[in-house]
């Protein structure tokens, strides 16, 4: 039996077991958590200092220009929905739902948090949490710790992984570190100035033990590889580092799903 067929069988049997209500309490709780992991897209968080390239990287990952230059939004969650929708949490704690994902329209409400729903194919596999905080190490650390409890994969965006960033990242849970990538989103600009090798070496020396991988990427170049007709210039995507990132994320997604399947199979 192929891994895919086994996965479908275990997923189906796990759902039946949870719905039956006949599992012992401890097993029911564990089975419910595993079913939730299998039913939902893998949760990916974009973290880093302000201006580190998180928003542009989000656009690349989901294959659409969700975030635009010049508009600042708070922390937002992007997940799949049948239609475009923005659920905005306002400063008074109330929520307002908009039938648009236009960044300027959302920003005009001055929300504290935004839950975006969009019918994008990529969001069938991943949801994306972009973590936004004031340019203060304490605030950023608090925000990243909050996000770590809501994420399966983390991408830390950086220009140099300086000491302040190292101190923010160091206390992150090991479970997240094992599934985290240190991203250098402006690799194309560094390469154009002949500085990429030196910059990459400097980041690797500080980040290799803290992350699964250190990945340089020319995000703008990677986005440009996506043609208007929906096709992709694979050579441009590979040269930009976008291919390496997408492959690494998909590998983590597959590993996470397989881990849940294996645990569910043992439980059943």
Image: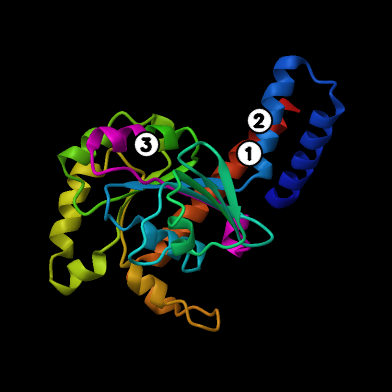
259 shown above or below 220: above
42 shown above or below 80: above
Q: Position of residue 88 (x, y in %)?
A: 53, 48
Give the crowd class for mark 1: few <14, some 14-19, many >=20 residues within 10 Å.
some
Residue lying farthest to the front in this orientation = 92
Q: Is residue 199 visible?
A: yes
For residue 219, which quarter of the picture? bottom left
Q: CA distance from mark 1 to mark 3?
A: 23 Å
Q: Position of residue 205 (x, y in %)?
A: 18, 45
Foreground: 257 or 266? 257
**Relative to 169, is 101 on the left or the right?**
right
For residue 212, which quarter of the picture? top left
Q: CA distance from mark 1 to mark 2?
A: 6 Å
Q: CA distance from mark 3 to mark 2?
A: 24 Å
Residue lying farthest to the top in this orientation = 25
Residue where numbered disc 2 is placed: 33
Give the residues in magenta.
118-144
Res. 37 mark: 1
**Relative to 255, is 238 on the left or the right?**
left
User: Image quadrant for the C terminus?
Assistant: top right
Res. 163 mark: none
Query: Which label sits in the foreground, 3 or 2?
Result: 3
Q: Residue at x 37, y 63 (%)?
A: 56
> Any magenta on residue 74?
no
Q: Residue at x 53, y 80 (%)?
A: 231
């Amino acid at each position: 039996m192929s891994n895919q067929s086994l996965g479908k069988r275990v997923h189906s049997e796990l759902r039946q077991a949870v719905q039956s209500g006949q599992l012992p309490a401890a097993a029911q709780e564990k089975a419910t958590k595993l079913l939730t992991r299998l039913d939902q897209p893998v949760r990916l968080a974009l973290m880093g200092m302000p201006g580190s390239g998180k928003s542009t990287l989000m656009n690349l990952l989901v294959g659409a220009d969700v975030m635009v230059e010049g508009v600042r939004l708070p922390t937002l969650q992007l997940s799949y929905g049948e239609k475009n929708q923005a659920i905005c949490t306002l400063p008074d704690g109330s929520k307002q739902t908009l039938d648009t994902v236009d960044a300027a329209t959302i920003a005009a409400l001055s929300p504290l948090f935004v839950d975006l729903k969009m019918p994008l194919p990529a969001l069938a596999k991943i949801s994306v949490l972009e973590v936004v905080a004031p340019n203060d190490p304490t605030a950023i650390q608090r925000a990243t710790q909050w996000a770590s409890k809501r994420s399966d994969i983390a991408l830390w965006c950086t220009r140099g992984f300086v000491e302040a960033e190292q101190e923010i990242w160091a206390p992150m849970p090991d479970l997240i570190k094992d599934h985290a990538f240190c991203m250098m989103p402006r690799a194309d600009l560094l390469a154009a100035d002949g500085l990429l090798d030196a910059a990459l070496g400097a980041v690797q020396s500080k980040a290799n033990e803290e992350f699964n991988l250190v990945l340089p990427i020319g995000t703008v170049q990677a986005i440009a590889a996506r043609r208007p007709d929906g096709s992709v210039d694979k050579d441009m995507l590979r040269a930009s580092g976008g291919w390496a990132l997408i492959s690494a994320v998909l590998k983590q997604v597959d590993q996470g799903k397989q881990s849940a399947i294996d645990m569910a199979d043992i439980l059943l």
